[in-house]
Amino acid sequence: MPLPKAELHLHIEGTLEPELAFELAARNGVALPYAGTDELREAYRFEDLQSFLNLYYELMAVLRTERDFEDLANAYLARAAAQGVRHAEIFFDPQAHLARGVEMGTVVEGLWRALGDSEAAHGVSTRLIMCFLRDESAASAMRTLEAARPYLDRITGVGLDSAEVGHPPVKFREVYEAAAALGLRRVAHAGEEGPPEYITEALDLLGVERIDHGLRCMEDPRLVERLVRERIPLTLCPLSNVRLRTVDVLAAHPLPAMLDAGLLCTVNSDDPAYFGGYAGDNFDAVAAALKLDEERLRELARNSFVASFLEDDEELRAR
Ligand code: ADE
Ligand code: ZN
């Protein structure tokens, strides 16, 4: 039995497996510039975050209808459940779909068809987190927040993702203020490729409750002290870090040092179809490469529920 866990850093578009990509391409009459799944998998060799994002956005072309988003989410939830995930807080990137003429309602309602009965169908409770693309303008993010207003009963929070360097959190200060005024929870990617200052900015200027990745906090001992003191969770994604070359090899991942420092670390999959593994695979990989004992793994699983947006009673049920 895999350890029960919550997944807090998962881009639903990053769960698009090559087989499903080709199935949806055929269903929607979309031509993919790859001869087949093997050739597509060959393209999964990334130099950095941007080289991954290029493929990630390209493949989204196959996602067109509510049913596509429903199928995508159901495929993820089934895989996650099989790896012990009991609760998933799922990111989606509406701007990448709106830009292709796919409406907010298609995305949210399609995802909701799967998420709405995920507890019954998969034994996985869910939350939906709408991310803004940080390499787009703040005005575009604000328009996206407006477009989401009819669907806010389905959306728990907002996040910030895509190309980090050169797009500091401060750019989205007003958007996050507006999101907070709408009662939305707030998280942001920071310190994946960007400097520790972006983590501080996300906390101070965007009011985030969690930091996605946050790896580079380790370059600033005073920031580490603060994150420990304020119990700010970090949603780490070890296999992602290796594939995007933020960390050379898994055996060199700073996770053990981060746990020793008292940081509230969680282990997640980010974009599992692209990075070689789902939540349980990430747990297994760090356990082996970093020689984590059973107690450490239980700590990571416990942290995932503590850091989640579940209410206390829901959290107890999910564990
Ligand atoms: N979008 C999907 N995966 C991402 C990641 N790891 N970092 C930033 N943006 C992303
Ligand atoms: Zn991410």
Image: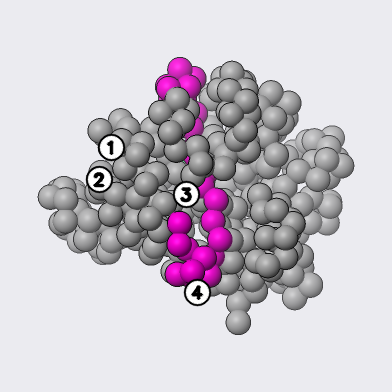
Identify the residue position indicated by label 1 in the image: 102
- Dot placed on the residue nearer the N-terminal end, 4 or 1: 4
Q: CA distance from mark 1 to mark 3?
A: 18 Å
Q: Position of residue 171 (x, y in %)?
A: 56, 20
Residue name at image x 73 percent, y 26 percent: 204
* Mark 1 crowd level (few <14, some 14–19, many ≥20, 10 Å Cα): some
Amino acid at pointer 3: His
Instruction: Please report the residue visible at 45 percent of the width from the left and 57 percent of the height from the top.
Output: 116
Verify CB contact (< 8 Å) between mark 1 and mark 3.
Answer: no
Quarter occupied by residue 52: top left
Q: Closer to the N terminus: mark 2 or mark 3?
A: 3
**Disc 4: which residue:** 82
Along the polypeptide, which appears first: circle 2 or circle 1? 2
**Residue pictured at 32% horizontal, 32% vertical:** 98
Image quarter (top left, top right, bottom left or bottom right) of the N terminus: bottom right
Q: Looking at the image, which residue sits at the far left?
A: 29
Asked whether the viewer can see residue 245, the reply is no
Residue numbers of the magenta segment: 116-143
Q: Earlier in the sequence, mark 4 or mark 2?
A: 2
